[in-house]
Image (cartoon, helix red, strand yellow):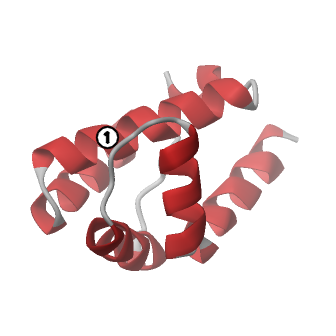
Amino acid sequence: MKNMAQQLINQKLKQLTVKELLFYSEKHRIPITKEEAAAIVKALKKNEDNPFDPVGRKRMFKKLASITSKDTARSVYQLLMKMAKEYGVEHWLK
């Protein structure tokens, strides 16, 4: 069941829109500009790294930092952690 849920989450990350990312960033008070959101969404669509694997997640956020900035990548990481906690799956990201 866990693998199925993780596959659904990975699929959602690949289908995330700029509008959705901006909604979640505002909801969780994480500053992301529209331009950064567009770059992040584009990168997530191409991402092959597993965000549930610590090594894959680190690689994914290094790529995001190179596309945007370290601060933005850190903000997106915080957003991911807050959303995981909201849905009760934060232990999957340890």
Image x and y of residue 30, in percent: 39, 40
Question: For this view, does 62 lie left or right of residue 12?
Answer: left
Decide which of 25, 70 is in the foreground and name it. Answer: 25
In the picture, which quadrant includes the N terminus?
top right
Query: In this orientation, does residue 64 appear?
Result: yes
Q: Is residue 92 above or below residue 7?
A: above
> Residue, x 60% and y 65% (percent of image)?
20
> Residue, x 48% and y 48% (percent of image)?
25
Decide which of 87, 91 is in the foreground and name it. Answer: 87
**Which amino acid is tagged 1?**
Ser
Give the residue number, with chain letter if any, for mark 1: 75
Decide which of 11, 23 is in the foreground and name it. Answer: 23
Question: For this view, does 57 lie left or right of residue 21?
Answer: left
Q: Residues within 10 Å of mark 1 (few under 14, many from 20)?
A: some
> Residue, x 62% and y 20% (percent of image)?
91
Give the total number of marks visible in the rendering.
1
Question: For this view, does 38 lie left or right of residue 69?
Answer: right
Q: In terms of secondary structure, where does tag 1 sit?
A: helix
Image x and y of residue 42, in percent: 38, 79
Image x and y of residue 17, in percent: 56, 75
> Residue, x 16% and y 54% (percent of image)?
65
Query: In this orientation, does residue 53 appear?
Result: no
